[in-house]
Amino acid sequence: MLSHLLHLSRHTPPVRMETVSREAFSPEFLRELHALANGLMAEDEEHFRVHALTNDLVHVFRRRDTRAVVGFQFWKAVPMSLPRTRAIVGGKLRIQPAFRQRGLHLLSGLTFFFQDKLQHPRSRHYRLSIASPFGFVSITEALARYHPFQPRPRTREEQALRDAFLSLARESHFQVDEESGVFFVGIFMTPETLGRYPPAYFERPSARAYAAINPGFRTNGSYVGFWFRFTPDNLASLTRATVRKLLRRQDADV
């Protein structure tokens, strides 16, 4: 199981991944996660709670020594309007800077996909995300291929994806710009967050692709939607990227 690689990774200190179902989202638990999230990107606590409760579960990453939360990723899976299709939706993702570039979110995504695939083996699975530039770059760089959200669908598949994205936006009280396809999520980047990334980071091809869709991302409180299918080439690419990042040295370049 991929999660066993956490025991082999070169993290200092070691990290473990816990799965918490929506039924266990107590007010105290959500406040703990919000404290981490708000320190990275300013967000109202009630806004955070509304989004959290639209999900099926959350993977929480904790330090083994202190039990402190160092990151989390929300997840849910829903049927789509195409025959035998399911959308895996990655909700809010936050990782402390010291624990980024270690593949934790990729491990989380693969774990959730395989668990849902076991329950729905005949379904075709899509992954939908409304992401910050950092989540977008980290995920898309690990893929063989992906597609930005298309606000003006041309095919039956694009229409089904549009319906799924808009349903996701309504649940979380997001607003979509029908022209650009950018989602206003009401989460604003702090100068501290932006300052952690050198100018060269924003010149990476995936970062430039994000900025082309959402040029005002630094100040507009909006994210980009994108999707991909769990095809053999994407699964192979994701798995390679996850293993490589989990086993890399902590002082390796990002």
Image (cartoon, rainbow, N blue to C red):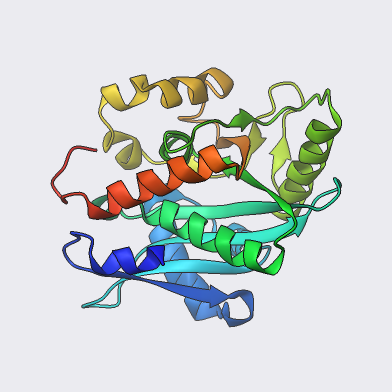
Q: At 31% from the left edge and 63% from the top edge, which residue is drawn?
A: 5
Q: Nearer the viewer, residue 126 or 64?
A: 126
Q: Is residue 139 visible?
A: yes
Q: Nearer the viewer, residue 173 or 21?
A: 21
Displayed quadrant of residue 227:
top right
Q: At 52% from the left edge and 38% from the top edge, which residue is drawn?
A: 233
Above or below for 62 versus 73: below
Task: Say how many tags the image has.
Answer: 0
Q: At 50% from the left edge and 29% from the top edge, which residue is drawn?
A: 217
Identity of the residue furthest to the left in this view: 251
Displayed quadrant of residue 149:
top right
Query: In the rendering, at what x and y percent does residue 123 appear?
Result: 74, 55
Query: In the rendering, at what x and y percent does residue 78 appear?
Result: 75, 58
Above or below for 210 versus 139: above
As drawn, is 162 to the left or to the right of 203?
right
Displayed quadrant of residue 254:
top left
As drawn, is 138 to the left or to the right of 81?
left
As drawn, is 159 to the left or to the right of 233?
right
Above or below for 67 versus 160: below
As drawn, is 48 to the left or to the right of 181?
left
Q: Is residue 100 visible?
A: no
Tell me the quarter of the image containing the N terminus.
bottom left
Q: At 20% from the left edge and 60% from the top edge, which residue is drawn?
A: 11
Query: In the rendering, at what x and y percent does residue 237 appear?
Result: 44, 40
Q: Nearer the viewer, residue 252 or 63?
A: 252
